Amino acid sequence: MSLLDLANPSRFLKFADRVLPWLGGVTVVALAFGLNQAMGAPDDYQQGATVKIMFLHVPSAWLGMMAWGIMSIAALGTLVWRHPLADVAAKTAAPIGAAFTLLCLVTGSLWGRPEWGTYWVWDARLTSELVLFLLYLGVIALWRTVEDPSRAARAAAILTLVGAVDLPIIKFSVDWWNTLHQGSSVFRMGGSTIYPTILVPLLVMAVAFTLLFVTLHIAAMRNEILRRRVRTLRLMQAQAAS
Amino acid sequence: MEGINHLPFIVGSYAAAFVVIAGLIGWVTLDFRAQRRALADLEMRGFARRSAPQPAAAALAKEEA
């Protein structure tokens, strides 16, 4: 089955029904393995056991950004190609991305207090991440405000593409400005600066969180397709009653 | 074991992750049930998509049996 075949909502529903139990199972195993690796990782020589917060904080940050990236591609699908599932994908990625961004902010704050002596500082990385969370809330509000799904999709797509500017700002904020937040230490020129005993559990958790995101996103897309069918049938019901 | 002094921050982070992930799973699961029920209810009243291969009411009844 090609990706284009899945553009049909009915085919997507069949695909989701078939793939979700397996994907859910693989996600549970990956999360259990990742947590086991994270708990078994050694303490950092400077941070001690608080480094364990990184195994949640960093994957959450990556997923918060990845979800907006997916929404941006879907926004192009809505505005340029009018792909049948594009706005479904964009709409359903927003709450999941918002949740991971919120988790990134909360865990970062709880990590910051023992390491920096403060829960929050208005530095470029933290502020741009907060802006991403507010953008998520804006897109979700927009979807809820505009009743007609196709009009809401176009408005949300424009806001999503404008908001995509925040992604490189988040990524490069630690290079462009002096920040309390540390610089890149995983994906950087010259290789990672993290020792393998900590880097491997981090990457395993990142894979597990990504699987969780994919599972939740496919399930939420299935729900949204069903919601639109319910809406269509209710309109038919209302027309029949009048 | 300097980190043990900061145990509440570590536990708080993992608890927050648990709450957020459980919330997402709960939202997706409850929403799925709600949509399936709404679709089944409408189909029972005789409103169905012309191209629907298997009515949601039949699928739901089969699942609950």
Image (spheres, rainbow, N blue to C red):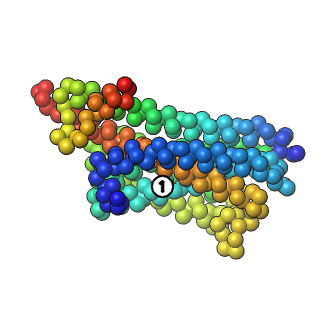
Q: Farthest residue toward the bottom?
A: A190
Q: Relative to A167, does residue A149 appear above or below in the rendering?
A: above
Q: Position of residue B65 (x, y in %)?
A: 37, 25
In the image, taking residue A156 as reference, residue A54 lies left or right, namely right
Task: Identify the residue shown where x is 80% and y is 47%.
Answer: A49
Q: Residue at x 45, y 37 (%)?
A: B28
SS of the residue under disc 1: helix
Whether residue A47 is situated above or below residue B20 in the rendered picture:
below
Indicate left or right for A187 with A68 as reference: right
Provide the residue designation for mark 1: A68
Determine if residue A137 is in view: no
Residue A104 x, y percent position in the rendering: 62, 48
Q: Residue at x 79, y 39 (%)?
A: B7
**Residue located 30% across and 58% down the image:** A5
In the rendered structure, the residue with mark 1 lies on which chain? A
In front here: B46 or A241?
Answer: B46
